[in-house]
Image (tube, rainbow, N blue to C red):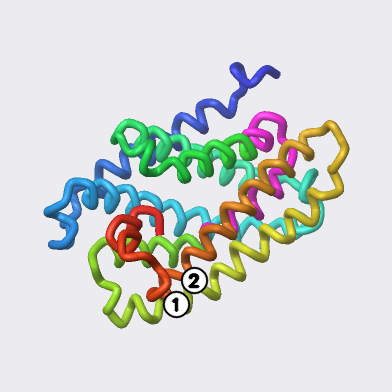
Amino acid sequence: MPPLLHPALPLLLGATLTFRVLRRALCRLPLPVQVRADPLRTWRWHNLLVSFAHSIVSGIWALLCVWQTPEMLVEIETAWSLSGYLLVCFSAGYFIHDTVDIVASGQARASWEYLVHHIMAMGAFFSGIFWSSFVGGGVLTLLVEVSNIFLTIRMMMKISNSQDHLLYQVNKYVNLVMYFLFRLAPQAYLTHFFLRYVGQRTLGTFLLAVLLMLDMMILIYFSRLLRSDFCPERVPRQQHKDKFLTE
């Protein structure tokens, strides 16, 4: 069935609108003093609140999907479950919402890395949504959201100038462990799996290309994370001032 007529479209629309409504609700919450005075920080704070909510829901959901359907760890292309399919639709809706939010807020140039990531992620997720293949791969990819819970806490504390708080100091070590377990390890496993599609003109080849680009981005982010949290003396002063949006 052509994608334009696909029954998954209402699921994508519903998920996208859900995150839009959630953002409006979260905007009613009080802001930290350091955030309130700066419109850019205010927008970024609200954007991260939605990201935080998505990470909690999708991270736990992905773990449950793997627990309920463990064959997703092996049969990455063919393993399927209704819960996993709905999770991929849910997260695709988030990426659509966040892309629109970034562009509509005039932050496309400053947040271009996020836009590139979102476009690649949506391209990969749509293969599972519209062609019902590699749903297991999409679920394994979303294990990264467990790591994003702690990464988002880190970014929110940086925006509110709370790097000296005990919670930040504890979280940066927890974040490092989670980065290895739920970001680097799943990506390495998926890359190893998709390398079998090298030279084949299949959907797997397209997903391998997307995965390799995401691998590059993840390694770049990891190097920034290490420099910022564990070698701050090596970070240029200008980055200390302006890079809170991406680091």
Horizontal arrangement in the rendering, residue 25 relative to residue 50 (left or right)? left
The three-letter amino acid code for the residue at tag 1 is Phe
- What is the distance, in whole Å, between disc 1 and disc 2 at their CAs? 5 Å
The three-letter amino acid code for the residue at tag 2 is Leu
Residue 62 quadrant: bottom right
Q: Read off the residue under disc 1.
A: 230
Specify few, some or many for label 2: CA neighbours under 10 Å numbering under 14, 14-19, or 20 or more. few
User: Picture coordinates of residue 178 (x, y %)?
Assistant: 54, 71
Tag count: 2
Give the answer, above or below, for where 154 lies relative to 192.
below
Taking the magenta stretch, the answer to whether it contains residue 142 is: yes
Taking the magenta stretch, the answer to whether it contains residue 88 is: no
User: Picture coordinates of residue 52 (x, y %)?
Assistant: 39, 56
Q: Secondary structure at mark 1?
A: helix
Q: Secondary structure at mark 2?
A: helix
Task: Please tell me which residue is depicted at 30% across the width and 43% down the height of the picture.
Answer: 23
Stretch in magenta: 126-146
Horizontal arrangement in the rendering, residue 16 relative to residue 214 (left or right)? left
Residue 9 quadrant: top right
Query: Front-most of 8 and 156?
Result: 156
Mark 1 near mark 2, Cβ–Cβ under 8 Å? yes
Q: Read off the residue under disc 2.
A: 226
